[in-house]
Image (cartoon, grey):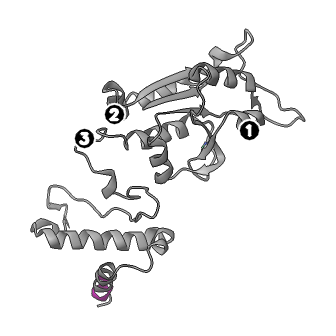
Amino acid sequence: MRVDIVTVFPDMVRQAAGASILGRAQASGKIELHVHDLRDYAANRHRSTDDAPFGGGAGMVMLPAPLFACVEAITGGAENVPVIYTAPDGEPFTQSVARELSAEARIIILCGHYEGVDERVRQSLVTREISIGDYVLTGGELPALVILDAVTRLLPDVLGNAASPHEESFGSGEPGAEVLLEYPQYTRPADFRGMVVPEVLQNGHHAKIMHWRRTQSLIRTRERRPDLFAKMLPLSKSDQKLLDAHDAEKSF
Ligand code: ADE
């Protein structure tokens, strides 16, 4: 998959994307990342990429010309390349959006800044606007990296023998798929400063471990994300049985 990121802070994006699994995915060619300095597409000698808003007011607005020129240079006129703009008023980024994007041959991500971009960019250049959460960041670089990370790890052979994306919190992200938080994990030692790993995990009884993990996922989801839990209702008979058994034990 090819990802082009358009930014006024190319070093920040390159650095962050060069480490860990993202770096390896690039080195092995699973992802082809191109980071573009928007200033290279500025029309004046000051390399300006923003200007004051028409109508007055605080802040600066990103100019349409450099963004259009940069995207046109990237696509070379090819149509149907998704152009994503990161903004707090975009569509919420979820695992299913990550899965949709990971099925594309290529995407372009525009990192917003200042008071945002000229509206004509959003209307005529951008195909999808994405927010990574209900808070405001200083720029779109971190959101672009979040999207890149979530998409890259879904590509075939990127995670190697690490956890399958299907067995973790937020599951496959496919429509209608079950969304359950992860169960707690432990490693050695079995007793750390008096905090002891649950007995069931230590004795290696596979079916009992599966039941314990499923129960933990259910109670975690019920406690921490009642919105996700509500979507699972009514529970399957077996899940209801596990929860009932857990709740009965707790009430003693
Ligand atoms: N730019 C600033 N804040 C943002 C957010 N929460 N999501 C995406 N882009 C942003």
Ligand 1 shown in quarter = top right
Q: Which residues are magenta?
A: 246-250
Residue assigned mark 1: 123
Q: Where does the image place residue 92, in percent across and percent down from the top left?
A: 58, 52
User: How many numbered badges does the structure rendering display?
Assistant: 3
Residue pictured at 62% horizontal, 25% vertical: 71
Asked whether mark 3 and ligand 1 are closer than 8 Å, the reply comes as no
Residue pictured at 68% horizontal, 33% vertical: 125
Q: Residue furthest bottom?
A: 252
In the shown orientation, is residue 147 left or right of residue 133? left
Of badges 1 and 3, nearer the viewer stands: 1
Q: Where does the image place residue 83, in percent across and percent down from the top left?
A: 60, 35
Residue assigned mark 3: 160
* Quadrant position of residue 218: bottom left
- Which sits earlier in the primary sequence, circle 1 or circle 2? 2
96 within the magenta span: no
Is 106 above or below relative to 228? Answer: above
- Which sits earlier in the primary sequence, circle 1 or circle 3? 1
Q: Main secondary structure of the magenta part?
A: helix
Q: Nearer the viewer, residue 75 or 52?
A: 75
Which quadrant does the N terminus fall into? top left
Residue pictured at 64% horizontal, 46% vertical: 136
Residue pictured at 36% horizontal, 27% vertical: 26
Q: Where does the image place residue 15, in percent across and percent down from the top left?
A: 44, 26
* Label 1 residue SS: helix
Kind of residue indicated by mark 3: Gly
**Are the residues at dot 1 and dot 2 in contact (C-beta closer than 8 Å)?**
no
